[in-house]
């Protein structure tokens, strides 16, 4: 039995590394059930074998940790959102779930016996709690990474419903129906109870159908990459430079490339296909600064977290993007679509410092024009704060462009 358990856990963890937190939940289940030492020993051997099988994948994925550099530290809002996702999005679902969950938790656990509540409660609580706590120091948390713990929520509610049904049956047996008559009619009542249970499940599923339908509509997605691509196609001209912040924001261009046709990807060194990576390989900081130095404007496609004050890029290239945009460019326009922000940045006006021997302004030769007279993006109003640390303090509203017309 234990070798089968170890093999199942190992395969599960190889498919999803963070599922290794299941072992903590199972350990808590054994502790609540007060299992004997021999059970702990067998479980430890099986769990150790699963962790050993997972070790090579952990070493490989550690070298690719930049793929999750976009994650930010979770907060209380993250906890509330996860709780609502597990327990129910509305009060009509959330409150009954809490009642049933409490009833399930109050169910006594006999020594040496594993009950449904003893399995469900640690599974629901421990993996998300541990990952959220660790992510306060090293961001690794995303709701999708702990969805397997969702199985504990309905199981815990089922344990509470079972206890409630047994309590009602005992009270009915004691006060409403004589014991002998109840026993005589038990067999006849079993099919009726089964049908009632099926009808209850069907009624619950029917009540959930509108929510299930909403979950599959584009409006329920955290991002709308098609809308982002369409907005880019309307705003950008052929040859306009585009900078993705961070590189994973390039996914809108990979999924819906039509809106980006003709645009220049400033930071890209090798495409995703050529490099065999998810989002392609980007140039180093020095080459990126050189490319940006020759631009008078740049469009930035930014993920929402990249505009938050708490985001700290881990790669030198991403840090160079923030530094150059913040130091050399001014925000002219902002368009927001679900999950992505599109911004137009123009270079700060260059103000030449007077030097000894320079001609007075009135005596400048006619054939030496001011390079900023023909600037197609003259600055309008007060400059906006750059992306990065100061952007989240007062994100600007988009302003209409005076050159290209209204948005």
Image (tube, grey):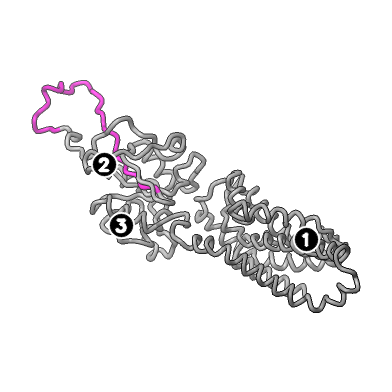
Whole-number angstrom distance, CA of label 3 to CA of label 2: 19 Å
Main SS of residues in magenta: loop
In front of the other: 211 or 396 = 211
Give the secondary structure at mark 1.
helix
In front of the other: 67 or 88 = 88
Magenta span has 355? yes
Q: Position of residue 388 (x, y in %)?
A: 44, 40
Range of magenta residues: 341-369
Question: Is 352 on the left or on the right of 28, as rendered?
Answer: left
Q: Residue at x 9, y 28 (%)?
A: 365
In front of the other: 170 or 225 = 170
> Of callouts 1 and 3, which one flags the residue occurring earlier in the amino acid sequence?
1
The answer to whether 76 is drawn above or below residue 1 in the figure is above
Q: Residues within 10 Å of mark 3 (few under 14, many from 20)?
A: many
Q: Which mark is residue 260?
A: 3
| Residue on which the image places disc 2 | 296
Q: Residue at x 50, y 50 (%)?
A: 70
Whole-number angstrom distance, CA of label 1 to CA of label 3: 59 Å
The answer to whether 186 is drawn above or below residue 96 in the figure is below
Front: mark 2 or 1: 1
The answer to whether 14 is drawn above or below residue 380 in the figure is below
Magenta span has 366? yes
Q: Position of residue 278 (x, y in %)?
A: 44, 61
Marks 1/3 in contact by CB < 8 Å: the verdict is no
Marks 2/1 in contact by CB < 8 Å: the verdict is no
Query: Quadrant where the N terminus lies?
Result: bottom right
In front of the other: 202 or 350 = 202
> Of callouts 2 and 1, which one flags the residue occurring earlier in the amino acid sequence?
1
Q: Residue at x 47, y 54 (%)?
A: 222
| Residue on which the image places disc 1 | 164
> Of callouts 3 and 2, which one flags the residue occurring earlier in the amino acid sequence?
3
């Amino acid at each position: 039995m234990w070798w089968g358990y170890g093999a199942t856990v190992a395969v599960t963890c190889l498919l999803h590394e963070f599922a290794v937190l299941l072992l903590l939940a199972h350990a808590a289940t054994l502790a609540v059930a007060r299992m004997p030492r021999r059970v702990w020993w067998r479980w430890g051997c099986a769990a150790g074998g699963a962790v050993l099988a997972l070790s090579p994948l952990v070493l490989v994925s550690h070298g690719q940790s930049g793929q999750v550099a976009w994650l930010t530290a979770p907060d209380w809002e993250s906890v509330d959102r996860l709780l609502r996702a597990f327990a129910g999005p509305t009060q009509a679902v959330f409150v009954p779930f809490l009642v049933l969950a409490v009833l399930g938790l109050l169910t006594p656990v006999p020594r040496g016996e594993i009950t449904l509540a003893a399995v469900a409660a640690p599974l629901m609580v421990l993996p998300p709690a541990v990952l959220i706590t660790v992510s306060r120091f090293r961001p690794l948390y995303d709701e999708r990474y702990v969805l397997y713990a969702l199985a504990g929520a309905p199981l815990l509610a089922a344990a509470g419903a079972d206890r409630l049904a047994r309590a009602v049956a005992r009270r009915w047996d004691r006060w409403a129906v004589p014991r002998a008559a109840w026993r005589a009619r038990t067999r006849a009542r079993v099919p009726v109870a089964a049908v009632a249970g099926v009808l209850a499940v069907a009624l619950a599923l029917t009540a959930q159908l509108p929510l299930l339908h909403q979950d599959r509509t584009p409006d329920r997605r955290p991002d709308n990459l098609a809308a982002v691509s369409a907005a880019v196609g309307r705003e950008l001209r052929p040859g306009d430079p585009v900078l993705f912040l961070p590189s994973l924001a390039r996914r809108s261009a990979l999924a819906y490339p039509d809106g980006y046709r003709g645009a220049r990807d400033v930071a890209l060194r090798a495409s995703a296909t050529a490099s065999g990576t998810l989002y392609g390989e980007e140039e180093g900081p020095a080459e990126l600064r050189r490319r940006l130095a020759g631009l008078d404007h740049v469009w930035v496609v930014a993920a929402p977290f990249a505009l938050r004050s708490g985001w700290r890029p881990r790669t030198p290239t991403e840090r160079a993007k923030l530094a150059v945009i913040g130091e050399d460019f001014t925000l002219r326009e902002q368009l927001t679509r679900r999950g992505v922000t599109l911004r137009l940045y123009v270079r700060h006006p260059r103000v030449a410092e007077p030097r000894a021997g320079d001609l007075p302004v009135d005596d400048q030769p006619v054939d030496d024009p001011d390079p900023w007279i023909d600037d197609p993006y003259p600055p309008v109003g007060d400059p906006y704060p750059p992306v990065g640390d100061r952007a989240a303090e007062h994100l600007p509203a988009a302003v209409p462009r005076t050159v290209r017309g209204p948005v």
